[in-house]
Amino acid sequence: MATLILPGWQGSGPEHWQAHWLDLMDRTVLVRQRDWNRPDLGDWLDAAVKAIERHPNPILVGHSLGAILIAHLASRYPELPIAGALLVAPADVDNQADGLPALASFAPIPTGPFGFPAIVVGSRNDPWMPSARARILARMWEAEYVDAGRAGHINAATDLGAWPEGQRLLARLTSVARHRSLALGSGFCGGAVRKAIFPPAAAAN
């Protein structure tokens, strides 16, 4: 099961935990975008869809705008084979796009439930999205919510290194995704399996 890394606006530099994960973890692939500084939703979706087609049933790991990209993938391409997703510090493009036109194409944020297990990690002092709104989105997406405490935007500025706690969340999500895949292969209902093993909007502190 591959892990696809989806950075946000301006990409993830060498000190970002996503960059560390690319160096440390096997079967971890960066989804490269044509222009990190001028993101276009259509272009970013196209790159992500092609990566998923090359690596079916991956775990998606999105940070900031990359997390919002996952929500658009789930909404627009429900047939895509996605095993699970970790959405870290999603960017509130609905309330940021006026001041940052580069993000406008990503608004509005889709709010429908995902068709795969997901974890949303929010921070209590994230300048890009209040934690209360991140919790609401997690509930709408039928994802688990994890409170990272006062961790800023959970990026290189937070000085997380390889972010061990995030690695543990990824390992747990991967285990859930594999369990779900086996259950679906046995003929169980996908939605029932997802909710039974991964309760929606559970709060982890």
Image (tube, rainbow, N blue to C red):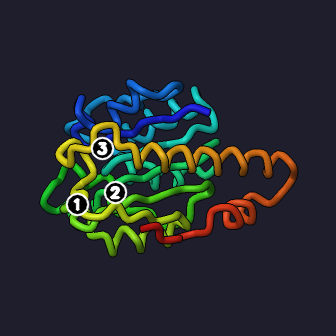
Answer with left or right where residue 8 lies relative to residue 125.
right
Quick check: marks 2 and 3 in contact, CB under 8 Å? Answer: no
Q: Are marks 2 and 1 in contact (CB under 8 Å)?
A: yes
Whole-percent x, y for residue 126 in the image: 23, 62
Q: Earlier in the sequence, mark 2 or mark 3?
A: 3
Disc 1 packing (10 Å; few <14; some 14–19; many ≥20): some
Q: How far across and how far down the image is residue 34, in percent?
A: 31, 29
> Distance from label 2 to label 1 (Cα)?
8 Å
Q: Disc 3 on helix, strand or loop?
A: loop
Furthest toward the left, the residue is 99
Determine which residue is flagged by label 3.
Answer: 8
Task: Mark 2 or mark 1: name the one nearer the start of the chain.
Answer: 2
| Location of the N terminus (image quadrant) | top right
Q: Nearer the viewer, residue 172 or 187?
A: 172
Q: Residue at x 82, y 45 (%)?
A: 185
Name the residue furthest right. Answer: 186
Q: Label 1 belongs to which residue?
A: 128
Q: Amino acid at mark 1?
A: Trp
